Amino acid sequence: MTKTAHQQLTLCILIPLILCAYTAATGYTNTQSPMILVYITVLSLTIHWIAAVPAIILKTEKFYDIIGTVAVWGIIICCYLLSPMNSLRSHLLAGICLLWTTRLGLFLLYRIHNHKKDSRFDSIKRQPLSFMIAWEMSATWTVATTLCATAAMTSMTQAPLSSVDIGLLCGWLVAWLAEALADWQKYQFKQHKQKTPFICTGLWAYCRYPNYLSEMLMWILVACLSWPNLTGTLYMSLISPCFVIILLTSISGINLQEAANEKRFGKLRSYQKYKKDTPLLIPKIFS
């Protein structure tokens, strides 16, 4: 076994162990249901492992994103079945997670059905261990992203909803609609010949990544909605919005897009002007 393969195998083992350890620690003080977060973690990992087998054999990423949606549905259903109590706040958080994952999963499935492939997987899908790591990272994404919501849903403390929560919900719906609109605008842009080879119209005229901004805002607002139910070690679930922000800005989002755009459009004056005049994330209407 080569050194690289040994490192990849080690990572394949460490990812689920670290994820399970973190969720176990998060639920530790949730006295009557301390292991539910571990159970949903194992469930998501299992769903991804099962899906990874045919994906690795066929070297395809066509059902990678939709499996994330299946896993989130499994996570939420598992929370409902195992939680000792369910409140209106829990129902709200469950609905939010399911609305988010269903819209995103179906959109990504529709997109890859039309585009036929995802360039992110061009090299790694030919390497079984690398591809397995990608599937485990998808499981990590489903668990870590929804952790605030699932922690609040399974908490022994179930706070009633207030007028502040209604405001937070309205904000979440605006962010959800903005992400859906931004995704659709970019998809439509790529389907037709345009004046510029890069999108700079619609929501994309206000900032360069309105879809990522909306995603970050959604999970910050979910954390705020979850907060009243959190106690003890459940506060560790607040890593959720931090995870989303770090993921989208530094791991597999803006950093990769910026590098790709610079490579493709960097020599165009129109792109340099758009880049100079348009904020990265915070819309210029707030600047």
Image (cartoon, helix red, strand yellow):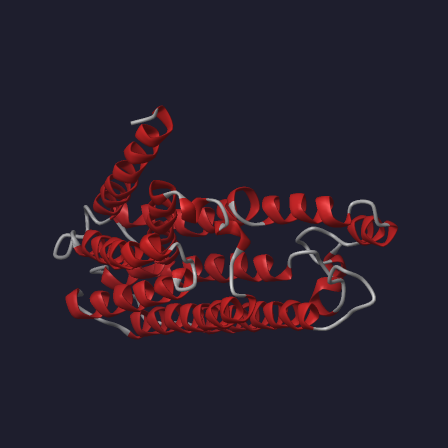
| Res 60 → quadrant | bottom left
- Quick one: quadrant of the C terminus? bottom right
Viewer-nearest residue: 6 or 251: 6
The residue at the far left in this view is: 32
Let me know if residue 79 appears in the view: yes
Find residue 105 and report its horizontal and vertical position in percent. Answer: 44, 68
Viewer-nearest residue: 69 or 92: 69
The residue at the far right in this view is: 269
Residue 209 vertical placement versus 82 (above, below): above
Find residue 119 and report its horizontal and vertical position in percent. Answer: 54, 53
Q: Total marks drawn?
A: 0
| Res 1 → quadrant | top left
Find residue 16 and report its horizontal and vertical position in percent. Answer: 26, 43
From the viewer's perspective, is 70 left or right of 215?
A: left
Let me know if residue 158 appears in the view: no
Find residue 23 and report its horizontal and vertical position in percent. Answer: 25, 47
At 33% from the left and 64% from the top, the residue drawn is 72
The residue at the far top in this view is: 3
From the viewer's perspective, is 63 left or right of 19?
A: right
At 39% from the left and 64% from the top, the residue drawn is 63
At 52% from the left and 65% from the top, the residue drawn is 116
Residue 284 vertical placement versus 261 (above, below): below
From the viewer's perspective, is 283 left or right of 14?
A: right
Residue 124 vertical placement versus 14 (above, below): below
